[in-house]
Amino acid sequence: MTAMFSNIWEEYLRPMLLRPKRLQVAALCYRHVGDTTEVLMITSRGTGRWIIPKGWPMDGKTCAQAALQEAWEEAGVVKAEADENPIGSFDYHKLRATGIEEPVTALIYAAKVQELSNDYPEVHQRKRQWMPADEAATLVHEPALQKLLRGL
């Protein structure tokens, strides 16, 4: 009897309750200042913690293009070159408006920034700041993103 319940749990109920991770795209915006690589960090709208621009994939855009679109909307990146292949990824839980946490994997695209605007869609909702990559690594919560930043 126990084996039957275990089988029902593993084969039917557990897979229905565990949702697969959703995909987001993120832009790791960077520039070189002398011998230092600086990254452009922004604050999240909800908690105010330091993050990199990220969002959902967009119809009609590659993942790298969608990451650049997010960098524009959230950080004012006007001109940047992004690699089409992700340089890494990180997992986190996104808190939805419903109060439910949703598992997400964010693919990270490197974006070499040439120009920023002081007027962009979320300028009044977030702070942005250039900082050395090793400093940024101490501020983010996601271990995989910390490791990637420390490797720059």
Image (tube, rainbow, N blue to C red):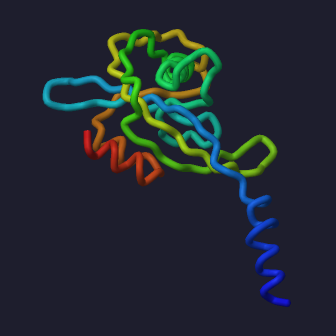
Image position, residue 60 (x, y; %): 61, 15
Q: How many marks?
A: 0
Taking depth in this image into account, of 6 and 46 the one nearest to the observer is 6
Q: Residue furthest left?
A: 35
Quarter occupied by residue 112:
top left
| Quadrant where the N terminus is found in the figure | bottom right
Q: Is 71 placed left or right of 47 in the picture?
A: left
17 is higher (above) or lower (below) than 139: below
Q: Is 5 placed left or right of 76 in the picture?
A: right
Taking depth in this image into account, of 29 and 139 the one nearest to the observer is 29
| Quadrant where the C terminus is found in the figure | top left
Image position, residue 84 (x, y; %): 40, 24
Residue at x 56%, y 39% (from the top left corner)? 48
Quarter occupied by residue 31:
top left
Residue at x 36%, y 16% (from the top left corner)? 81
Image position, residue 150 (x, y; %): 28, 46
Image position, residue 115 (x, y; %): 37, 10
117 is higher (above) or lower (below) than 92: above
Q: Residue furthest bottom?
A: 1
Taking depth in this image into account, of 5 and 107 the one nearest to the observer is 5
Q: Is 97 placed left or right of 36 in the picture?
A: right
Taking depth in this image into account, of 114 and 144 the one nearest to the observer is 144
Q: Is 142 placed left or right of 112 in the picture?
A: right
Residue at x 77%, y 77% (from the top left corner)? 7
Residue at x 81%, y 89% (from the top left corner)? 2
